[in-house]
Image: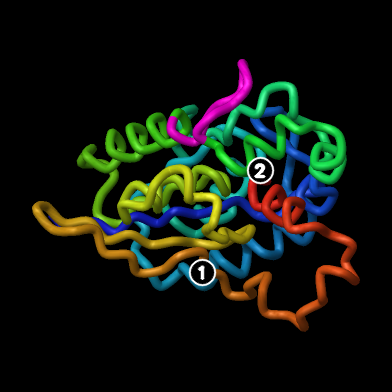
Amino acid sequence: MKQTLLLIRHGQTTWNVEHRLPGQLPSVELNDNGRQQVLRLAEALSVLPISAIIASPLERARETAKIIAQGRDLPVQLEPDLMDTNVGKWAGQVIEELVKNDPAWKEYVNNPTEAPEGIETFPQVQQRVVAAVERWRKQEQSGVYPAFVAHSDVVKLLLAHYTGLEAKRAGSLFIANASVSLVELEDAKVPHILAIGWSPSPDWLKVPIPDILKGKSESQEQGEQKI
């Protein structure tokens, strides 16, 4: 059976705007812009016969899933193994401050296959999220167009798995808020990537501003991709 997986990142939150790491903390919800982003994405996806909606239980993903589900006779099913990376002691902290003050954070960004105690590595996150998606997609009720609503790292690591990219390099992918990546799977065939981080209004579609004017270093830009 051929299946097309929709891997959806949640809409924008205030924490995204503040460049603050949410990790697995509760009560990080979509802001007004995030809700509008998801509404635009939901409209664009209305042409697809989504057959199931499975979401991380964290509020930002759950709310995104509920908006995607509007107008469809589908329940939102929650999957704890789709939660964001557990960043432990870094949860709630501003990335710019971590870049300035915590060498361990910079080491983790450069090599997410190793992490301090209490913080998930990329291989650990990948193992649980791939297992969750494979478990769900093999259920008959998931159908041929299951949508998985989760987080940036989760989407990146799923794409890395299905493309054969090393987990260490998954951070090089850009997955915007309220974007969808599509992976076509068919028995005995190599996975077919139909889209990576597509959205109706992509973050990169704006006048470029030189980094020197934004006051951001390269390491900060890399860190922001983890939110």
- Side of 180 relative to 92 (left or right): left
Disc on res. 198:
1
| Residue at disc 1, secondary structure | strand
Q: In which quarter of the image is residue 213?
A: bottom right
Disc on res. 60:
2
| Residue depicted at 62% across the width and 34% down the height | 58
Compare residues 121 and 127 and report the one nearer the observer: 121
Q: Where is residue 62 in the image (x, y as percent from the top left)?
A: 59, 41
- Side of 101 relative to 136 (left or right): right
| Residue depicted at 63% across the width and 45% down the height | 63
Badge 1: few (under 14), some or many (20 or more) residues near its Cα, within 10 Å? some
* In this rendering, the label closer to the viewer, 1 or 2: 1
Query: Looking at the magenta stretch, what is its main secondary structure?
Result: loop
Instruction: Give the residue type at disc 2.
Output: Arg
The magenta segment is: 113-123
**CB of mark 1 within 8 Å of CB of mark 2?**
no
Q: In which quarter of the image is residue 129?
A: top left
Q: Where is residue 78 in the image (x, y as percent from the top left)?
A: 48, 33
Compare residues 145 and 116 and report the one nearer the observer: 116
Instruction: Give the residue type at disc 1.
Output: Trp
Q: Which of marks 1 and 2 is nearer the N terminus?
A: 2
